[in-house]
Amino acid sequence: MMMRSFGIEFVPMELYWRTTYYSIQAERLGYDNIWITDHFNNRNVYVSLAVIANYTDRIKLGPGVTNPYLVHPVMTAQSVASLNEVAPGRVVCGIGAGDRTTLDMVGVEMKAPLRTVREAVEVIRRQLAREKGGYEGRVFRTAAGARFNFKVQNPIPIYVGAQGPKMLRLAGAIGDGALINASHPDDIREAVRHIRRGVERAGRRVEDVDIAAYTSFSVAESEKKARKPVIPVVAYIVAGSPPSILEKHGVSTEVADQIRSDLANRRWGEAFGAVDSDMIDAFAVCGTPEQCTEKIDALFKTGITQFVTGSPLGPNVRGAIDLFGREVLPHFKES
Amino acid sequence: MSYRELVKRIPHAMYERLSEKLMDVLLEAKGGGDVPSSLAKTILYYWQRDQLASEAGLVNLLQAVEIADPEGATAVLDEFGLEEVKLALRPAER
């Protein structure tokens, strides 16, 4: 039977104890994975994860996703390896090219994303395996002997975050998992095709790759209440989406550029005001529990094996986790 | 009067619903950052063990809400008809 698991994303904008509270709640309700985003302007991802690891027992957890532009892969390897000592066997590592809007803000150029992510994954794997030899990539280099002073006892699966076709194929080729940054069934279906192509070209088995739809998600008792909180998130997604994705959903690059500029300059009203209903349908999974169940069911039929409820989750985070855990999750866990 | 003594004045039958309400207020409170880390961790300790509705859980919750959102604490106590507890918490309002 095809594996079906559920992840939840938290953005550590909140105080650490609130994120931890929600994480305990998610574990109790049957979620399988916790993904914590990594942005310089929020609280540190590994501090957040370490606290969550302390207060949970079963759920898997990791960065979702970190990027190799702001964090060197040897440091990512060190962080997840250290986290593994707090939560043995529960650590996963999500890595992607990052978010253009955020990188722009700190003057970091997203150069050669495919090569950078590929090399970063190689460096992380070598570090976790305590390889003795050095690494000579075009982007990253490590000297022979540049390795941990401690052993990593458990395997740490690496998930590659992807949106565009090439990155999706790379995720299929090298990832233990793939995190598809999309919410619309058409986008996810196409993404799964690309991932499978990458898997096949690399001579791997598709069953060995956990394919996750990392969605912008919101659930509430009414559709109206569920849609409102996704607006800011959709603004960021539009701002960070490649032109091919925007075009597919009828969003002009001019509109996306304007939203990106408004976000970078903290003109929230303008940025969020530009998000329309079609954008919400294209870039978010939201609605009542019944509507969400139906949408998630359709997404699993595209071939994904994990569904991630990304932020904002709902108008009230605690209420949304509870609603999802009571009224949506059992539909899949019991079937 | 200590928070423990205050909680002892609350009927046991209210513990479950009261803890839920207080947690709702605490999670949304603008003053959440004022809650000492040690107190926040104690609350997480009880939550992890599903004991926030115990006497000890409520003692810590009430204390945290009183720090993070005193008006919210008052509103919850009013909603539950816990006038005596409210006045004991804020003697100046007598």
Image (spheres, rainbow, N blue to C red):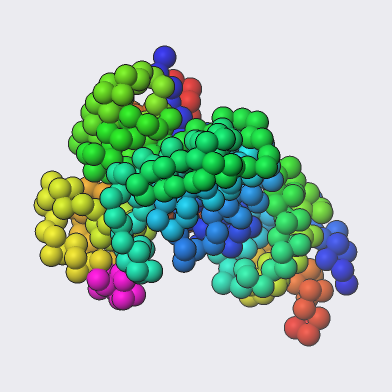
Q: On the rendered structure, is A143 left or right of A182?
A: right
Q: Which residues are magenta?
A: A261-271
Residue at 31% across / 44% down in the picture? A115
Residue at 55% across / 34% down in the picture? A131
Q: On the rendered structure, is A308 left or right of B93?
A: left
Q: Is residue A217 above or below residue B92?
A: above
Identify the image quadrant of the C terminus of chain A: top left
The image shows residue A250 at horizontal and vertical percentages of 11, 52
Of A87 and A189, the residue lying toward us: A87
**Residue A302 visible, this orientation:** no
Q: Is residue B16 above or below residue A229?
A: above
Query: In this view, which residue lies farthest toward the top?
Result: A1
The image shows residue A266 at horizontal and vertical percentages of 34, 75
Residue at 79% across / 74% down in the picture? B89
Q: On the rendered structure, is A55 left or right of A206?
A: right
Q: On the rendered structure, is A112 left or right of A77?
A: left
Residue at 64% across / 49% down in the picture? A50
**Does A267 appear in magenta?**
yes
The image shows residue A324 at horizontal and vertical percentages of 46, 41
- Name the chief secondary structure element in magenta: helix
The image shows residue B29 at horizontal and vertical percentages of 58, 68
Identify the image quadrant of the N terminus of chain A: top left
Of B65 and A305, the residue lying toward us: A305
**Does A187 appear in magenta?**
no
Of A259 and A108, the residue lying toward us: A108
**Residue A120 visible, this orientation:** yes
